[in-house]
Amino acid sequence: MKSKLIFATNNQHKVDEVRHVIGDRFEIVTLREAGIDIDITEPHDTLEENATEKSHTIFHLTGQDCFSEDTGLETDALNGEPGVKSARYAGEGRDFQRNIDKLMLKLQGQHNRKARFRAVISLILSGKEYQFEGICEGRIATEQKGLQGFGYDPVFVPDGADKSFAEMSMEEKNQYNHRQKAMTKLIHFLSQSS
Ligand code: IMP
């Protein structure tokens, strides 16, 4: 029988990406499928604390094994901005385009475009928490390109590629994807512990 894991997110893009790699042994249940209709807050200064906040919230509601994920885009020229504030960089509306516009404006004329996505997954298994990190190094392009994906995908070019995440299919993006790197560690951990 498949083991069930609730994924504490309302972001369907993230769910699709994770389902793509999770394999047959685990069934990913979304918040909506679990009948949970909440917008979990991300009030902390670190990705680690926010991931913990989300997984603990869902665990306390359901008592079931679950995991959450928090990601930040960190740029060197802006001392790690937008970082933990990536989702709300241009305000509470969490508008992807406004976030990109703000980032591009702040990096205008800047030669150092180095950036990375850093994802932290918090897993709660049998009531105990474990964390996994995934990093994708790359750079912020000087212009926005592509229509796939979400968030900062149109301006992020991973190291080793010559196009943005938004110009890639999901398979291509998953070769570099920060979230997949953290998920691979989680899957490895689960296969060792079952
Ligand atoms: P969250 O708080 O973990 O949902 O993510 C924070 C923000 O980072 C999101 O709103 C997106 O703007 C951005 N983000 C997270 N993962 C990705 C990704 O894979 N591609 C592009 N942007 C992402």
Image (spheres, grey):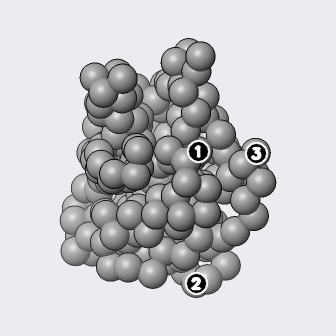
Mark 1 Cα-neighbour bin, 10 Å: few <14, some 14–19, many ≥20: many
Nearest the camera: 39 or 27?
27
**Which amino acid is tagged 1?**
Ile
Q: Does the residue labelled 1 lie within 8 Å of ligand 1?
A: no
For marks 3 and 2 on the same chain, the one whose residue lies earlier in the sequence: 3
Left or right of 53? Residue 188 is: left
What residue is disc 1 on? 6
Quadrant where the C terminus sits is top left
Q: Distance between the residues labelled 1 and 3?
A: 9 Å
For marks 1 and 2 on the same chain, the one whose residue lies earlier in the sequence: 1
Q: How far apart are marks 3 and 2 (CA)?
A: 29 Å
* Residue 141 picture location, percent across and down: 41, 52
Residue for point 33% across, 53% down? 129
Specify the label residue 33 is tagged with. Answer: 3
Residue for point 76% across, 45% down? 33
For marks 1 and 3 on the same chain, the one whose residue lies earlier in the sequence: 1
Q: How many marks?
A: 3
**Which amino acid is tagged 2?**
Gly
* SS at badge 2: loop
Quadrant where the N terminus sits is top right
Tell me if label 3 and label 2 are in contact, CB under 8 Å.
no
